[in-house]
Image: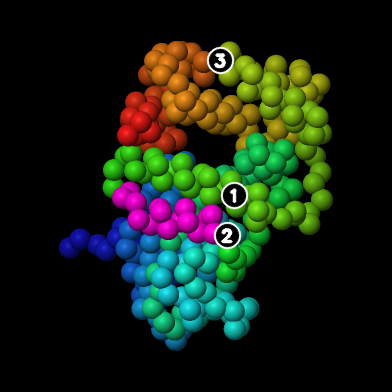
Amino acid sequence: MTRDPVSRIIGATDTPTGMKSVFDTLKTAEATLERFAWLGDELAIAIWQRDGGNEETAYQQPGHHTLSCYLDGGYQTERATQPGVFGAPHRLCALPGDHDSRWRVPAPMRFMHIYFQPDHFTRRAVLELDREPRELTLADRTYFEDPRMASVCEALARSDWEHEDTRLQANEAVHGLLSTLLQTQSMRSTVHAKGGLPVATRRLLRDYVDAHLDQPLTLGRLAQLACLSEYHLARMFSISFGMPPHAWITQRRIDLARELLRTTALPLEQIAERCGYANPSHLSHRFRDLLKVSPGTFRQALRA
C-alpha cells in the first residue's frame, strides 16, 4: 500500500528530525498535506489544510525555523499564550527552532509553511547585516503583517513546484523572503558574545575570501591575515561566521557561481575558473550538492 505524503516525509532518512516532529504533529492533528517540495539549500515548502477541531496542537522545539503564512481561513485560530488574537489570510508567523507553542484551530484553514535551517539565518547575519550569527536570533512573532512578504507567499502558493525551473524560481523567492525576515523581524540576543573575531578582522577575512575565490585558499593564509594560529583561527572563525572556514568558502564559491549564471553568458568552464574549481565537472558536483540541479539546468530555468 502506498503511504500518504506525510508518512513518506516522516519516514525519509534524510528528513531533518525537527521537520519530522512538525509533520508528525500536524498529522496527529489530522491536517492534510496539499503539496510539499524541497527547494535546494535545505529549504522546504509545504501547503497544509485543516478542518478544525477542539484539541490543542502543540509544537515543541522543532530545531528548524518556520515561516508561516495563512492563505485561507484562520479567523478563529489563536495561540494559547495570546488568547483573543486571531489569524486571517495574509498574516504571518515566524517561529524559531527552539520555540514551544500551542494553538487552537476550531475552524477550517489553509496555510503555507516554509522550513529553513538556523544556519541560513545566521549566515545572512554575517553577509547582510555584518553581524555575528550569535548576536541575532529569529524573533518569535505571531500574526504580524507584511504585505510584500504575504504577496510573495501567495505567489509561491500559486506556482508549480513540480518542475526544476519553477522549483528554482521558488528557491530564489524564498531566499528573498528570508532576507526580508532577517532585516525586519530579527532581534538581538541577550547572550553576551565572547570568543569571536573582532569586527575589523571578520570584515578583513570576509572581503579577502570574496576577492580570492578564484585562487587556492588555505587556513594558514587566513590565520596569517588574522594574526592567529590556525587552531585559534578555525575555532574563532566558526564562532563568528556560523560555520568552519572550508564550509564558508564553499558556500561563497557557489554563491558566486549562481550570480555568474544569473547575470552573464560566460561558459561553464570560465565560471568554474572564477569560482576556484579545477574544471566544470568539479563545479557541477558542488553545485548539485547544494541545489540538487546542475549549473546548466539552473541557467536554463532562469532564462525560461
- CA neighbours of label 3 inside 10 A, class few (<14), some (14 to 19), many (20+): some
> Alpha-carbon distance for marks 1 and 2?
10 Å
- Label 1: state its secondary structure: helix
Q: Amino acid at mark 1?
A: Thr
**Magenta region, mostly helix, strand or loop?**
helix
Residue 99 is drawn in which quadrant?
A: bottom right
Q: Secondary structure at mark 2?
A: loop
x, y percent for residue 56: 49, 81
Q: Is residue 209 left or right of residue 108?
A: right
Residue at which label 2 appears: 146
Q: What is the crowding at mark 2: few (fewer than 14 residues within 10 Å), some, or many (at least 20)?
A: some
Q: Please give the label number shown on residue 232.
A: none
Which mark is in front, 1 or 2?
A: 2
Circle 3 sits on which residue? 214
The foreground one among 224 and 258 is: 258
- Element marked by disc 3: loop
Q: For residue 147, which quarter of the picture?
A: bottom right
Q: Quadrant of the C terminus?
A: top left
Q: Residue at 59% of width from left, 49% of height from top?
A: 180
Q: How is the image coloured?
A: rainbow
Q: Nearer the viewer, residue 266 or 118?
A: 266
Please tell me whether mark 1 or mark 3 is closer to you in this view. Answer: 1
Q: Quadrant of the N terminus?
A: bottom left
Q: Is residue 280 left or right of residue 236?
A: left
Q: Which residue is mark 1?
A: 180
Mark 1 vs 3, N-terminal side: 1
Residue 180 visible in the displayed image: yes
